[in-house]
Structure formats: C-alpha cells, structure tokens
Amino acid sequence: MSNDLLREFNEELKSNDPELTNIIDSFTTKQVLKKSILSDKERYIVTIASLVANESTLLYKDMLNVFLEVLSPVEIKEVLYQSIVYVGLAKVYPFLDITNHVLDENNVELPLDGQTTVKYEDRLESGYNLQVNNFGKEFIDGNIDSCPDSQKHIWDFISSFAFGDFYTRSGLDEKLRELVSFSLILSLRGCENQLRIHTRGNLEVGNDKKKLESVITVLVLYNGFPRTHNALAILNEVCEDF
C-alpha cells in the first residue's frame, strides 16, 4: 500500500493549516488504510469518482500526478467519462479540462487511444444485455414495462448511452466500472435507491461485501460520516437479502 494520496496537499494549505494536514495524514495512514482491502489501483479509482461527485476540482488537481503514478491516462479518463452518466456533464467538464492540461504537461499525447467496442447501431442491445447481466432480467424488464409510455425513452437512454456507450468500453473491467458507479452514487446526496441497485450490481459481478465496505471506508474523508452511515445501512440491507 502506497503512502496516502494527500501527501500532495498544496504547499499553501500545509503552511497555513499544519495541524489540519497532520490530523488528516495521520487519520488516513494510521487508521483508514489499515481497514481497507483495496489495491492502490482500486483505491485511486474510487477516490477519483468521489472527488468528481463532490465537485472537488482543486483537490483533484493537487492529487492527479499521484494518481498517474499508479493509473494509466486511459483509466483516469474512463472514470471521468463514466461519471457523466451519474453526475452529469456539467460537473465532469472541469475535471476533463484539468486532466488534459496535466497530461499535456506530462507529455502524454492526446487524444488517447479510443476505447469504443460497439457500433452505434448495437448500443441499445449491448447496453440492455449488460444491465440484465448486472441487475437481472426481471428487474430491468419490470422497470421498463411499468414505466409510462411517455417516459420509456429514458430507459432507452440508460441502455444505449449509460451502458451501451460507456460500460462497454475497454480501459476498465466490469468490476471496476461497478465500483466507480457505487462510489459516485454513495458520494452524491439523495440517491439511496440508486445505491441499493448498484450495491446489488456490484455483488452480482463479484465485488463482495468486504470490498464495498472498503470503498465506503476509504471515502469517509471525502464524504463525511452521514453519507458513510447511509451507505453502510444500504450495504447491510442489500447483503442480507442477496
């Protein structure tokens, strides 16, 4: 396990708030990391997702070069691209701009290699099949069938755009993609129903309760304890019924 990410606090904060930075450093290295089973790669990926959901552009910029010590530019970009599905382009846009500037400073040639794996005309079917795999055919079809006709296009959007355009991409495997979704949703506010769905999705693709507990644990610092307690309650609820 590498040193904590927050060693890259900007120098002004270290100078002006030394007690705070020491408290946070001690908390992460002496407590949080000891309770996590995540690899550095997994931990960095879920941290990026949480920073995006929390719109923490300054902290992301300070930490990005540390992320690049473990993650490839493609992996980082894939987390950002997938985040659009859950938090919207308005929140992700500045993270893309920061990332492109830092990659350019690191002499990374842009654009990166494409990761698309499906044809445009196959997006809907491919995305639907992924949803069925992750959440079950009965659940997906039940939601589509019960949806008013005037709103069914949203489910087509979910299948074709959210899953067909993004989940089918290479760069991250399905286990990592579900961890990204879980991290984004638990870092948002008022999305408990969606968190239940993606908790089950994680379990279906092989991310067990211990791993999801570790995700919640390493994101305590970024999300605070109220959202942490909400996520743990949902995790316990879903695992009991799984």
Image (cartoon, grey):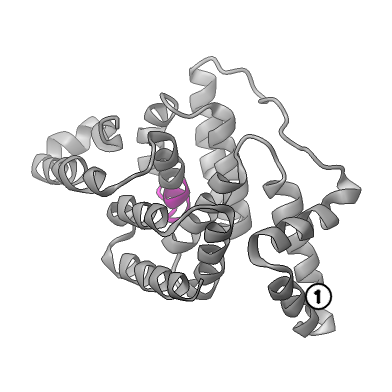
18 within the magenta span: no
**Residue at coordinates 46% horizontally, 41% vertically from top-left?**
45
User: Circle 1: is it few (<14), some (14-19), or many (20+) Cα within 10 Å?
Assistant: some
**Residue 117, position in %: x, y?**
78, 38
Residue 92 screen position, x and y as percent: 55, 48
Quarter of the figure with residue 145: bottom right
Residue 172 picture quarter: top right
Q: Is residue 50 magenta?
A: yes
| Residue at image coords 50%, 35% | 98
Q: Is residue 157 above or below residue 206?
A: below
- Residue reaching furthest left? 19
Placement of the N terminus among the 4 image quadrants = top left
> Residue 37: where, in percent of width, then height?
34, 44
Identify the secondary structure beneath mark 1. Answer: helix
As drawn, 206 above or below 185: above
**Residue indicated by mark 1:** 152
Evaluate whether residue 148 shows in this view.
yes
User: Does residue 206 appear to the left or right of 14 in the view shown?
Assistant: right
> What residue is shown at x 37% (from left), y 55% (from top)?
210
Left/right placement of residue 83 relative to residue 165 reads left
Residue 114, image x and y in percent? 73, 30
| Main SS category, magenta section | helix
Instruction: Give left or right: position of 208 versus 12.
Output: right
Question: Number of callouts in the render?
Answer: 1
Residues in magenta, as a range? 49-56
Inspect this view and state whether residue 89 appears. Answer: no
Q: Which residue in the rendered view is the most extreme toward the top?
A: 107
* Residue kind at label 1, given as amino acid type: Lys
Give the camera-side residue of 139 and 187. 139
Relative to 186, does residue 9 appear above or below in the rendering? above
Q: Nearer the viewer, residue 31 or 242?
A: 242
Looking at the image, which residue is at 55% across and 28% down? 73
